[in-house]
Amino acid sequence: MSEELYRLVYYSRNAIDGDEAALAAAISSILEKSQINNQRVGVTGALMFNSGCFAQVLEGSCSAVEAVFERIQQDERHGDVSLLAFDPAPSRAFENWSMGFVGASVDDAARYGTLVQASGFDPARMTGEALFETLYRLALEEERAAA
Ligand SMILES: Cc1cc2nc3c(=O)[nH]c(=O)nc-3n(C[C@H](O)[C@H](O)[C@H](O)COP(=O)(O)O)c2cc1C
């Protein structure tokens, strides 16, 4: 019997110091590690960086998502980690992504993603559902662009 699927949504504030290049390198390294780790434990999801904030969706078994989120919360590359949702989900929204980076390329996100006023994006004002919908829409756009 397959385990019940869960979906977790959170946002956090960037704590990576340094210039654009350092930020881009740190995000790339987070993604590389995430893709390896998540694939191993059947977790899928998406990450975005904008306005100095990370927003992330994780989906998988309850125990796998909890274990990954536990590690993420300890990570000093971000802070003020705010959990918006952690609920059973009917199906995976990011089936093809062990951890997709959405919204912009890593380089563009590092270049422009610290400009709060540029986009008006403020995950602190969004519900878990709205943030999930945003990442899902961006992932669909990227899948379409890649096809
Ligand atoms: C914004 C952000 C998102 C992250 N997302 C994940 C993730 O999806 N999966 C993961 O394994 N680690 C993720 N990490 C990294 C973890 O915090 C941690 O560094 C990593 O899991 C440690 O892996 P290791 O024990 O294999 O070295 C993320 C870190 C940050 C700052």
Image (cartoon, rainbow, N blue to C red):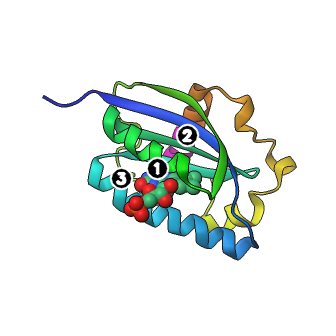
Circle 3: residue type: Asn
Quarter placement of the N terminus: top left
Residue 47 in view (yes/no):
yes
Left or right: where 38 falls relative to 85: left
- SS under mark 1: helix
Q: Quadrant of residue 7?
A: top left
Q: Is mark 1 within 8 Å of ligand 1?
A: yes
Q: Which residue is mark 1?
A: 71
Q: Earlier in the sequence, mark 3 or mark 1?
A: 3
Query: Residue 11: percent from the left, percent from the top?
Result: 63, 41
Q: Is residue 105 above or below residue 100?
A: below
Q: Residues within 10 Å of mark 3 (few under 14, many from 20)?
A: many
- Residue drawn at x 61%, y 65% is 106
Circle 2: residue type: Arg
In terms of depth relative to the viewer, which is nearer, 67 or 50? 67
- Between disc 3 and disc 1, the foreground one is 1
Residue 100 in view (yes/no):
no
Q: Is mark 3 within 8 Å of ligand 1?
A: yes
Q: Earlier in the sequence, mark 2 or mark 3?
A: 3
Circle 1: residue type: Arg
Give the extent of the magenta segment: 135-141
Q: Which residue is mark 2?
A: 137
